[in-house]
Image (cartoon, helix red, strand yellow):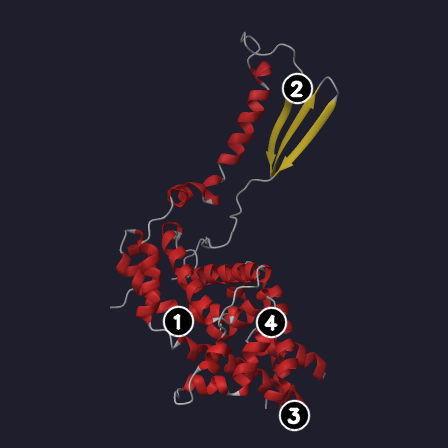
Amino acid sequence: MQLSDWELVQKCQKGDVGAFQELVARHYSKVFMVVLGILNQREDALEIAQEAFFRAFRKINGFRGGAAFYTWIYRIAVNLSIDFQRRQKRNPTEFRETVDDVAENQTESESDPYRDLQRSELGKQILAAIDDLTPDHKAVIVLRAVEGLSYREISRILGCSEGTVMSRLHYARKKLQEKLTPFLS
Amino acid sequence: MMKCEAVRDNLGAWLDGEVGHPEADQIRGHLEGCPACLAEKKRLDQLQSSLQEVLRLEAATVPFELFWSGVERRIAEKLPWRLQLLDWLRPVFYPGRLAWAIPVVIVSILGLLSLDQILPEWPWVNKNNRTAVESIDAFGFNVAIFREYDTKTTVIWLFENQDDEEQSSAEPIQDDNPTF
């Protein structure tokens, strides 16, 4: 029988690293998606997502099950991503490989669904348009897209009101639509 | 009948299932008869699904072994002593556990300042009484009145209990009802 997240957390709190590995296996993909959506830089996203799980591991003894594990780890990951991006804005000299660069550097012989989608104008344009949003707006639109979280859950992750989530989502979608109108059917 | 502008303002929230029943029905009804708003809805749908797909396919290129190796390396690395100390102390400083400490510290300080009133016979208590705490109350708020006699200055201090749990970054949300 598969253990729940909370049962795995309790095992982690007793020092079981294997239980934490199971938690990572369950959630790493979506956490990575969220971070990537905010940063649009693959290598940075990988680092930040791994750092988020490491921080969760360090603080696991303080997790008392008040919220689902995934909302907690999203919260850590989003905060780290936003902090990272703000730091990067202040020090923009460091070169990083964006998702678009990765796609363009692929050889023509390689073919897989992701690369095909990346090459499509819409995929590229969506990522570029999101990149122009503020970190707070990126966070709401990505959390909604990746996990389909309710406004209440997003508000708890971001530490703001549901009304703020709604208005940020509305603004972000409006901005994206303005930029993507030629690419949306 | 809702106007197009009102419908479009709420279309995103409606697609997210965050609009209440009467309004949601009005939007649904409007979409059935308005091709322009229906096209807008389709664009929003497309936007959402395309974003999800781009990110999903990108995440699929990161194997678990690669991801876990990065996490495991961090776990295996020895933390600096400051962080180790912080981790060790962290449970003590959870806001919920810290709530009692703030009033105790305040009362202790006020008590020290009022020693000459509480223990007037003690020889080492300053007899030149210059300051005094007049009262401490706790009807919803804690109230401290601090009076300095020489300059006839009175400070009235209202402060709330620190029961609310501060939710700083990277901290768990502490609710009463576990949702697992």
Residue B104, percent from left and from top: 51, 31
Q: Which numbered dot is residue B7?
A: none
Q: Secondary structure at mark 4?
A: helix
The quarter of the picture where residue A163 lies is bottom right
Amino acid on which disc 3 is placed: Pro
Read off the chain for label 2: B
Left or right: residue A30 versus residue B63 is: right
Q: Which numbered dot is residue A169?
A: 4
Amino acid on which disc 4 is placed: Leu
For marks 3 and 4, give the one nearer the viewer: 4
Read off the chain for label 3: B
The quarter of the picture where residue A65 lies is bottom left
Amino acid on which disc 2 is placed: Thr
Q: Secondary structure at mark 2?
A: strand
Discs 2, 4: same chain:
no
- Label 1 or label 4, whichever comes before in sequence order: 1
For marks 2 and 1, give the one nearer the viewer: 1
For marks 3 and 1, give the one nearer the viewer: 1
Q: Which numbered dot is residue B131?
A: 2
Discs 3, 1: same chain:
no
- Label 2 or label 3, whichever comes before in sequence order: 3
Discs 3, 4: same chain:
no
Q: Which numbered dot is residue A29?
A: 1
Q: CA distance from mark 1 to mark 4?
A: 23 Å
Residue A168, percent from left and from top: 62, 68
Left or right: residue A61 versus residue A142 is: left
Q: CA distance from mark 2 to mark 1?
A: 62 Å
Query: Dot 1: within a 10 Å radius of its alpha carbon, few (fewer than 14), some, or many (20 or more) residues?
Result: many
Residue annotated with mark 3: B35
Residue at (55, 72) in percent of width and height: A141
Q: CA distance from mark 2 to mark 4?
A: 55 Å
